[in-house]
Amino acid sequence: MNASFWNYPSKQKSWPIDEEMESLGEVIHPLDNIGGFDVRPGFYQMNGAYQTEEGVSFTVSSHGATSCVLLLFRPAAQEPYARIRIPESYKIGNTYSILVFGLKAEDFEYAYQMDGPADQARGLLFNRKHTLLDPYAKAVTGQRNWGEKPEGGKDFVYKARVVQSDFDWGRYRNLNYKFEDLVIYEMHVRGFTKDASSGVKGGGTFEGLRQKIPYLKDLGINAVELMPIFEFDEMESARVVDGVQLYNYWGYNTVSFFAPNTSYAFHQEHNHEGDELKRLIRELKENGIEVILDVVFNHTAEGNEDGPCFCFKGIDNNIYYMLTPDGYYYNFSGCGNVLNCNHPVVRRFITDCLRHWAVEYRVDGFRFDLASILGRDQNGAPMENPPILEALAFDSILGDMKLIAEAWDAGGLYQVGSFPSWNRWAEWNGRYRDDMRSFLKGDSGVAGRAITRITGSSDMYDPASRGYSASVNFLTCHDGFTLYDLYSYNEKHNEKNGWNNTDGDNNGLSWNCGVEGETDDPAVMSLRRRLVKNAFAALLCSRGPAMFFAGDEFCNTQYGNNNAYCQDNIISWLDWNRLEEFQEIHDFARFMIHFRAKHPILRRDTKPAVCGLPSVSIHNGEPNRNYTDYNTHLIGIMYAGRNADDTDDDMIFYGMNAYWEPLEMRLPSLPESYHWKLVVNTFCEYQDGADFEAQTQGDQTRVRVPERSTVILLAEHDL
C-alpha cells in the first residue's frame, strides 16, 4: 500500500487512515533524503500544506513549469534556510507533491520557486528567482500589522504558514433563512469599530465586531455582508495626500483567496489563523445573523505588466489570467488584470476556495464583486452559459449557499436582470437603486418604475419562476454616497482621494435639500431626516431581500466622498457619536426592520387572503388606480395574504408622496370587521422612545399624505 496516495493527512492517531494502516501493519517511511530532509511523495489530492503525524505534505500544480523548489523559512526570516527541489518522480501529471518528515507547523514558513519557459508573447513568465505564494495557502505571513511594509519599504515577499484546522463547530447547522427574508447589513470589518467612539476593545478587528453583536441583534438585521476579508495588501498604491496616509482600504485586491486577513485579527493566531473569525461567525449565527462574504474573483493584487509576480503569474500566468494575443492583460476589472475564470483550472480553484469557506468557516453565502467577469471566455467575450457560474449553481457543497452577483463589470458588461442564474443566482439590483433614488427625491416620470421596483421588479425577474429571491434591493452600499450624504450633497467631494475629484460616480442621483453639505438650518435638517426615513420605509416595504450600508441607520457620513476606497480614517470609519445625534433615524430604521419581520407579505407572496384580495394591488391616489404619468408623485401599494399559521388576513398599505406639497390619498376599502390603523407617518414629530404604532387613523376612507412623506397603514380587526 502506497500511503502517499491516501487522501487523509494523519494529523492524529484517531484519523481513519492511521487506524487502518495500523491494522494492516503499515507505516509511512521516507523514500529519499534531499538536503538533509527525509522525504517521500505527499498527498496529491490535497492542495496546499497539511500537518501529519510524520511531517508536512506540500502539494502544488503547474501546467507549464519544468521544475519546482520548496522553500522553507524560519518564522519572519527573509531568506530560506532550506531549498528542497521536488524530484521529477514526485510529479504526477501537473502536480508536485512531497511529504517532508519531521517538520512542525509552528517552526517554519514556506513558499515555492518554479522554473520554465519565459516568453511574454505567449504569456509565460516563469522565473526561478521569484518567490511564489502557495495559491491554497491558509495563512499568509508578513502583513500582521495594518499599514506596515517590510523593512526599508520593500515589497512583500509572501510566504505561507500551515494552519491547524481544529476549530470545533459541534452540532451547529446553518440558519438557512429564505433569501427574500434577509435584511442584509453591508459592512467593512475595520471601519465598523475602528473609531474610538465604537467603545469596543480591539477596534477594527473581528473581535471588535463580535462585541457589537448585541447592537446588531437589537437592530433586527439577520445577515451581515462583510466586505473583503481574504488576505489583501492595503499597502498596494499606498500614498500620502495633503499629509494624510492613504491605503487600499476596501480590500478589493486579493493576495490569497484561502486565507483570512491577519490584520483583522485582534489576537495572535500563530498556526491557528482564522479562529477569531470563526468565533465571530459562530456567535453571529447563535444570535440569528447569517454571514455573507464579499469575494473578488475578477482580478488579483498582481496587477498588470508592471505589477509584482508573487503567485499566479509565476505558476501559470497564461492559464490564470485573460491575456491579449500578444501576452498582455485584459482589464475588464479596472484593476490591471482579469482572472480567466472559465478555464478548467481556474474554475476548480474558485470552487475549491468557496467550498473551503463554506466548510471551514460555515459562511452562508457569497457576493461576487464585478461578477459579469465570471461570465466572460478567455478572450473576454460574454458567454451564454458560463461554466463557472453553472458549476457554482449546482455544486453539492455550495447547495444552500446564497449566491449574489454584482451583475456588471468595468468593461461595460451590464447584466442586471439578465445574469445567468439557473434559479440560483441573485443580483444586486442596480436598477432598483437608480429608479428608487430618482423617485424618492421627487423626480418626475419615474413613479411607474418605482412601483415595479418596490413590488419585486417583475419586469426583470418573473415571480412565477424566480419568486422574490432574485433581486437584492438596495439604495446604498460601500460604493457611492451614504444614505445621509445622498440627501446632503448634489456633487461628489472626493478631493481628499488625490485625483482632483475625477474618481467616483458622477451621477449619484442625490439631492442636497437646498444646502450643500453640513448645515444648522432646522428646516433643511428636518427634510433630510424625513427623506432618510422615506428611504428606509421604501426599502423595507419592497419585495425581495433588502440591503443597506452600515451606519445608514444613524446617518453616518463620508462628508460627500462617494469613493472612499482609500480613506482609512473618519471618512470611512463609523462615527458612533452620531447614534445619539440621530437616534430618531436609528429608532425608525429599527422599527421598520422589526415591522418587516412581523409581516411576510412585505417580502414575498404568502398564503392567499381569505377575503379574496390580491397579493399586490396598486392605488395611486384612488382605489385601484394603477395608472401613472409624468406628473405622478403619489403612489399607493397594498399587500394582502396570510402568514403560515394564521387564520386572519394580513393587509398593509404603503403610500408615498414625493411631491413638495401635501396630497390626499383615498384608501382602498377593507373587508368587513377590519379597519385601517396608521403605523407610520414620516412627517410626524419624533419623540424619544416613541411607539411608532401608537398613531391613530380616524378617517377610514382617505389620508392626507404630507409633502415628501410616507404613510403606512395596517389592517386591524374591529374590537
Image (cartoon, helix red, strand yellow):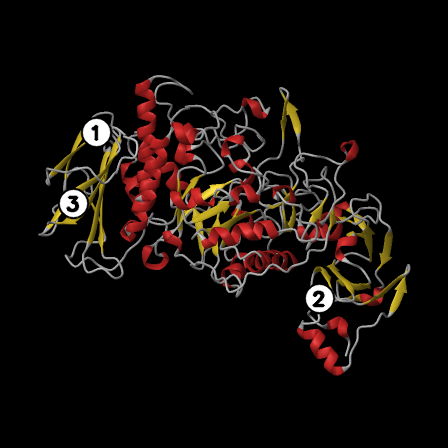
Query: In 3D space, how far apart are the residues under numbered discs 3 and 2 (Cα atoms)?
Result: 68 Å
- Label drawn at residue 11: 2
Q: For the residue marked with disc 3, what is the amino acid?
A: Asn
Question: Which residue, given by chain and number where applicable, does mark 1 sit on?
Answer: 706
Label whose residue precedes the other's in the sequence (3 or 1): 3
Q: For the residue marked with disc 2, what is the amino acid?
A: Lys
**Residue 37: x percent and y percent?**
87, 61
Q: Nearer the viewer, residue 342 or 475?
A: 475
Mark 2 and mark 1 in contact (Cβ < 8 Å)? no
- Label drawn at residue 624: 3
The residue at the far bottom in this view is 24
Instruction: Give the residue drawn at x 27%, y 57%.
Output: 606
- Say above or below: 29 vs 121: below
Instruction: Give the residue drawn at x 59%, y 24%.
Output: 499
Numbered disc in front, either 3 or 1: 1
Mark 1 and mark 3 in contact (Cβ < 8 Å)? no
The residue at the far left in this view is 672
**Relative to 377, is 66 on the left or the right?**
right
- Say above or below: 202 vs 663: below
Quarter location, residue 697: top left
Instruction: Give the residue drawn at x 63%, y 57%.
Output: 349
Residue 246: in sight, yes or no? yes
**Residue 698: x percent and y percent?**
11, 37
